[in-house]
Each structure stands twice: as structure tokens, then as C-alpha cells.
Amino acid sequence: MCRPISAQFMTGGAVAMFELEQAEAGIRIVSEKHYRLVSPDQLTVTELEKYRSTTLDDEQMHCVAKPARRTTYHGGEDTMGKMRSQPAARVRVVYNEDFSTGPGAWTTGKAVEGGSWHRNIFGDRGEPTPLRWHKSGGRRGPFASTEPPWYFDDNHGEFMWLYLAFFVNRSSLIGLAGADLRNAEITLSLRGHRFQPKGTKLFFWVQGSPNREAPPEKGPLYNWALSSQPIVEELLDGRWHSRTITLTSDEGRWSSMGHLNGGLARKLRVIQSLSVLDGSLDAILDGGHVNFGFLLCGVDPNDPPTGRIDIEQVTIRARASRPR
């Protein structure tokens, strides 16, 4: 049986699809689902199996896409008119690193005696250290990598114990200080090299302040992990994969990381509870970010992850800057 449908492009590269019906008051939305179009290699094995086994009655509408964040619209001609009138966001590449001449601004967290980071429960201080650079071996030649031993970060133990796998220590180092990263898309080309996650997951992470008028050193800085978009399976087979994540400002898709130790080894002091971050994410993504990157989260220090993570390219696409 034929069913009338319509589609609407949304900000952040999402597509809303609707099943419609004629009602007395006009056109009514019967079913709504949001998707983001992706290339086949960005779908996980679990997602492919789900799409293969889903029937029309289960899902109503199919496309080669990943479900996006659900937003509810109430039906009727008025609503559809408002949706059509929304201008499409202009998205452009605001940053690209292909590691052709070195690791660039990308670093990893290493234990360094005399480092600027707090002394952790193992007595180690930490410091950002440039990624290891490889002149060849990637799909296009050069790439960078991160590998153990990593600095054990116990500052966010109420969330998870973690390693700072690869990150940019200051947004300004790549020309993105003050940039609006809400709904930005970050595409990685990466692989695991003999990598054993040991239960860890790779999450995007951002640190910043909702008060952009205060310099970072005046604090406090809040930390968020994009826990709804983990990177795991792409690191298991030793092959290069492209993976795109979207920096939605919906705090329900993130995990607040809190702040525990405060630099006191073997002592516990709560500096920031998990709930104190509530309501801060939008402003942090909208120019309040100080640094960001990717964390290996869920570390068991008695059985840590092993192997290497290789990164061949990092591309960030964001909507065109608006006057502030």
C-alpha cells in the first residue's frame, strides 16, 4: 500500500522524514523519524544487522542512514509551513589536518615528572605530548598515532577513569578559539593497530567555560564527554575507517564528567559534582571551549588497553560563523 511521505533537511546534516495523512483540518503527520545520511563504512555491524531485520511495520520508513536525535513536531499545515521556512544552515570545513608534515597541534597525555597536570593516585604528573608521527603507512602516506603508556587521569572518577588519547590542548592552536561548534561534524580517518580496548570506549570530549568573558585560567572549566557516539568497532579490525560524529548541544546525548581529586594524590575531594554542569554545554560549544579531543574511557588500571590508535585525518565542518 502506498503511503504519502515528505522530507525536511535540518541543521547539523540531519533529515526529518514524515508519513502523512489527509485529515479534516488538513495534512497531519502520522509518523516522524530523523536520520543522518552516512557512507556505508560508517554503519556499525550492529546497525546493519538491525536494518536487515527491521520490517516496514517496525520502522515505517527506511533509508541508508543513522537515526538522529528525535524532536517532536505537532502536525498540521501551520507546522509544515514553519518547517519549510527554516533556512538551511551553511556548513563549511573550518579545520582539516592530514598530518602530512607532522602531528600538528595534536597531543596525547603522558606521565611526565614535573608535568603541569596533577599528581595522580600512582604518583605521576602528566603533560600534553605531541603524537608520534609516521611518514608513511597510511592510506595516503603520513599519519599520527597514540599509544601506551598513557597518563592515568583520575580527576573524573565519578564519570570514568580515562586516558587522554589524542586532543588539541588549546582551540586557539588550530584557529578555532571562539568558534561555534554546535552541531559541528568531526570526521576521523583512523584505525586500531593491534589494539585491545579492554572494555574502554573512545569518546569525544570538550572542556570549557560557559562564561566566555573570563580567561581559562580563572576557571572553573567544565568537562563533557559525547558518550552517545562512542568509537569502538572501528578500532578492532586493523583497517582504516572513516567515522563522523556530530556535536549536538543536547545534554542528554553527553555525560558530564565532574571533577574529583583536585590535585591531591590518594585523597578524595569533590571539586565539581556531576550536576553542576547542567545547562553549560550549549555555551561551551558556542565558543566557550578551551580544548577538545578524544578520550579512552572506562580504564581498568589493572587491565589497561593495549596497542595503538592511528589517525590519518581530522576534518571539522561547522556552520558559517555569525556576528557576535
Image (spheres, grey):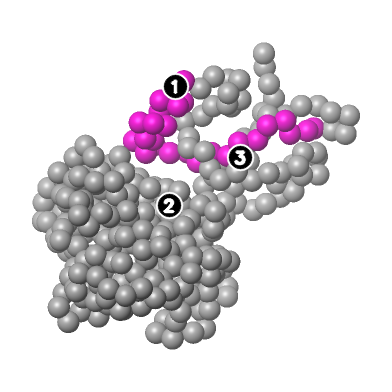
Secondary-structure class at tag 1: helix
Where in the figure is residue 41, as x and y percent of width and height? 34, 35
Where in the figure is residue 143, as x and y percent of width and height? 18, 54
Q: Is residue 283 above or below residue 53?
A: below
The dot on residue 227 is 2
The answer to whether any part of residue 97 appears in the image is no
Where in the figure is residue 7, as x and y percent of width and height? 63, 36
Q: Residue at x 46, y 57 (%)?
A: 255
Q: Earlier in the sequence, mark 1 or mark 2?
A: 1
The N terminus sits in image quarter? top right
The answer to whether any part of residue 85 appears in the image is yes
The dot on residue 16 is 3
Where in the figure is residue 105, as x and y percent of width and height? 26, 69
Give whichever of 44, 295 is nearer the camera. Answer: 295
Toward the front, the furthest residue is 267
Disc 3 or disc 1, which is closer to the eye? 1
